[in-house]
Image: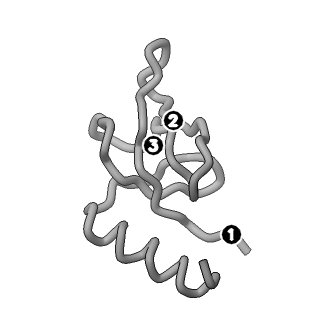
Amino acid sequence: MCIAVPVKVLEISTTNQDRAIVDYGGLKRDVSTALINEPVQVGDYVIIHAGCAIQRIDPEEAEETLALMNEMLGS
């Protein structure tokens, strides 16, 4: 089973605007942002599924979701 996860955008690729580095639970991951219609900016939260950002998400909603996930994992 796969789960979509909210992550924070740390940087946008300088060579390919459809790629970004995100904070994935403390790990930095390179993901595609090509599926999102509007430009993604540093500080945005996006939903990641299978290595691709599929939607931007409200920062408060993202932080609430991450807190709930951490609580479920006992982190």
The N terminus appears in which quarter of the rendering?
A: bottom right
| Residue placed under numbered mark 3 in the picture | 35
Q: Residue at x 42, y 23 (%)?
A: 17
Callout 3: 10 Å neighbours few (<14), some, many (20+)?
Answer: few
Q: Dot 3 lies on which element?
A: loop
Identity, as a three-letter code, of the amino acid under mark 2:
Ile
In the image, residue 66 above or below residue 57: below
Q: Residue at x 34, y 54 (%)?
A: 56
Q: Going from the N terminus, do you reach mark 3 or mark 1 first?
A: 1
Residue 46 percent location from the top left of the image = 40, 53
Callout 2–callout 1 Cβ contact below 8 Å: no
Outermost residue, front side = 75
Residue 67 percent location from the top left of the image = 44, 77
In the image, residue 6 above or below residue 42: below
Q: Residue 21 got which mark?
A: 2
Q: Residue 50 got which mark?
A: none
Q: CA distance from mark 2 to mark 3?
A: 15 Å
Residue 51 percent location from the top left of the image = 62, 47
Q: Going from the N terminus, do you reach mark 2 or mark 1 first?
A: 1
Number of the front mark, 2 or 3: 2
The C terminus appears in which quarter of the rendering?
A: bottom right
